[in-house]
Image (spheres, rainbow, N blue to C red):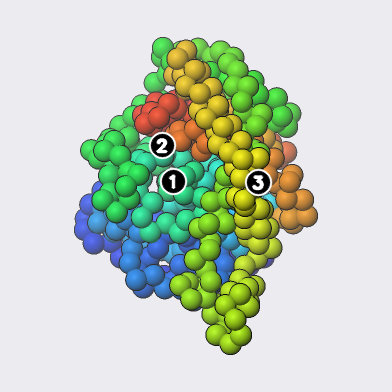
Amino acid sequence: MSADHNIFITEETIEGESDGPLADRTVAVKDNISTEGVRTTCASDMLADYVPPYDATVVEKLTDAGATIVGKANMDEFGMGSTTETSAFGPAENPVAPGHVPGGSSGGSAAAVAAGEADLALGSDTGGSIRNPAAFCGVVGIKPTYGLVSRYGLVAYANSLEQIGPLAPTVEEAAALLDVISGPDENDATTHDEGEDSDYASAATGDVDDTTVGVPTELVEGADEGVRERFEETLDDLESQGATVEEVSLPSVEHAVEAYYVIAMSEASSNLARFDGVRYGNSGGFEGNWNEAFSESREAFGEEVKRRVLLGTYALSAGYHDKYYKQAQDARAWVKQDFDEAFQSVDVLASPTMPTPPFEVGDSLDDPLQMYLADANTVPVNLADLPAISVPAGEVDGGLPVGIQFIGPAFGEEEIIRVGSAVEN
Ligand code: GLN
């Protein structure tokens, strides 16, 4: 592994265009977010030479706010993974835990912040890809409520689940970046007026008096012992600052990983159909018939991407749709309902962000199923369209970071920012 931890796929400076709120800040941007004139690869051989003709809305907002973009960050190919090891440009390394993965799929973004290569970063979170690397690299990451941040210019993996969001060293800095990127966008019909004149940064008061934190037992039981210890200590600390902690139950989350992967793979199989060598991606050449040219072009996908396109196509195919996709949608509705009920009695929910500390490099690639199960605590949030933050909560095993996750009700960003900032007190 090179000394730079393989954080960036492309290092190129895009200067800010004002002396706005981010005038003195540098930002790393995940390489699935379009940058006009700067290649945007999604860490795939398929897009190794793709140069977008336009900026994503969030990139425009960054430069309008005066930020300087310093590079396009490494990631799992098309966002499919939890370790940044499925990148066609080689894995990124965790700068604070050498020999370990930085998490994923926004591993390069989190590593850039942890290594001081950028002040701030943007990632995308379809099923945990901001919170997981934030936890593994010991930084803060926010997955916004679905619709708070424009997805225009984000290369789609599973568009009903994903949001772009901030990574930063502190809760307040992450919140300030969210202030810049949130708000309605005429180019993304799923965006919401909420967030238009936001002031999330001011919510980082560290005040948890009269706050009730619910702990879903189902999201704690499966975690490693050391992770659970850090989690319990953090809750004790919040109680000593005036919060009330109580147990709640979310029975549906037992089915969240299955439902998430059926939905994510189904959407991926449809979204990735555009990479056919004609519309986008490497041309397979035009000799022979369409099917041959199409399949030749799609050789450029890595193993994990191929697996997901195949499984997703299967789940959506005639005769199987009701058995898989429809059931997954029913489970998604159930998860949403469970969260709604929990928020009748608590202000935020808390869990370990990840059930384990960062994996060792190379450990995860042989067993995709094991990898999918590591997303148990992050994917329910995406199924329910909710906001969540991961904040550093200490270390285990001599220096491996652990994160605590707070989940809020829809558009409850201020709540999770407030409670998250109390962890830093
Ligand atoms: N690990 C999950 C997956 O592979 C989440 C990825 C993401 O949020 N982009 O789908």
Side (left or right) of 179 relative to 306: left
Q: Quadrant of the N terminus?
A: bottom right
Rounded to the nearest angstrom, the CA distance separating label 1 from label 2 is 8 Å
Q: Which residue is mark 3?
A: 320
Toward the viewer: 249 or 62?
A: 249
Local crowd size for mark 3, using a 10 Å CA cut-off: few (<14), some (14–19), many (≥20) = few
Side (left or right) of 49 relative to 365: left
Q: Which mark is residue 163?
A: 1
Kindly indicate whether the residue at mark 2 contacts the one at mark 3 (C-beta within 8 angstroms). no
Q: Which mark is residue 410?
A: none
Give coordinates of residue 217: x percent, y percent. 64, 20
Q: Amino acid at mark 2?
A: Thr
Local crowd size for mark 1, using a 10 Å CA cut-off: few (<14), some (14–19), many (≥20) = many
Numbered disc 3: secondary structure: loop
Kindly indicate whether the residue at mark 2 contacts the one at mark 1 (C-beta within 8 angstroms). yes
Numbered disc 2: secondary structure: loop
Side (left or right) of 14 relative to 365: left
Position of 357 relative to 245 (above/below)? below
Give coordinates of residue 178: x percent, y percent. 35, 43
Q: Earlier in the sequence, mark 3 or mark 2?
A: 2
Q: Which residue is mark 2?
A: 145
Q: Is residue 236 visible?
A: no
Rounded to the nearest angstrom, the CA distance separating label 3 from label 2 is 31 Å
Position of 37 relative to 30 (above/below)? below
Q: Nearer the viewer, mark 1 or mark 3?
A: 3
Rounded to the nearest angstrom, the CA distance separating label 1 from label 3 is 29 Å
The residue positioned 65% from the left and 32% from the top of the image is: 255
Give coordinates of residue 39: x percent, y percent. 44, 71
Numbered disc 1: secondary structure: strand
Q: Earlier in the sequence, mark 1 or mark 3?
A: 1
Q: Amino acid at mark 1?
A: Gln
Image quadrant assignment for residue 399 = top right
